[in-house]
Image (cartoon, helix red, strand yellow):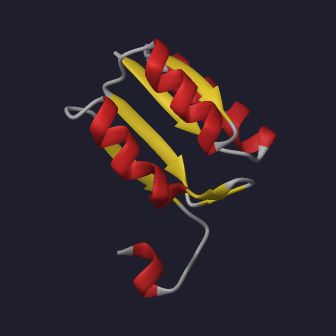
Amino acid sequence: MRILLVEDQASLARQVAARIERAGYGVDQVDTIEGAIHALDRCAYALALLDRRLPDGDGISLVPRIRKRQPEIRILMLTALDAVDDRI
């Protein structure tokens, strides 16, 4: 299983990617929406872990693009936002 990690904070991305790899999964890490789009065109993923706040926009805006390219992918949002509306 391959996982796409979209996270712009380098230290957090390294930590998450290392844990994913230790669990036996392959992981590709990118730090922008544009990088995620390129990755989705190159590889099939079972799961996308998306940060909400990215340098080139909100991770939520990437969801329709992911669904169009890979309809079966599972998506999990990562966020430090704490408002209920942001988390739901």
Taking the spot 27% from the left edge, 33% from the top edge, the residue there is 73
Work out which residue is located at the far left of the displayed protein and give it.
72
Q: Position of residue 3 (x, y in %)?
A: 44, 25
Q: Is residue 65 visible?
A: yes
Q: What's the residue at 20%, 32% (across, down)?
A: 72
Where residue 32 sits in the image (x, y, percent)? 67, 42
> Residue at position x 37%, y 39% from top?
66
| Nearest to the observer: residue 61 or residue 46 | 61
Q: Is residue 41 left or right of residue 73?
A: right
- The image shows residue 20, relative to residue 8, as above or below, that is above
Instruction: Name the residue located 36 percent from the left edge and 22 percent from the top edge.
Output: 45
Q: Is residue 49 left or right of residue 76?
A: right
Q: Position of residue 70 (x, y in %)?
A: 29, 29
Q: Nearer the viewer, residue 19 or 3?
A: 3
Say whether residue 74 is visible.
no
Residue 33 on image: x %, y %: 60, 43
How many numbered dots are placed on residues in this image? 0
Of the 4 image quadrants, the one containing the C terminus is bottom left
Front residue of 55/68: it is 68
Of residues 49 and 12, the one drawn nearer to the viewer in this rendering: 49
Left/right of residue 48 with respect to residue 72 in the rendered view: right
Quadrant showing the N terminus: top left
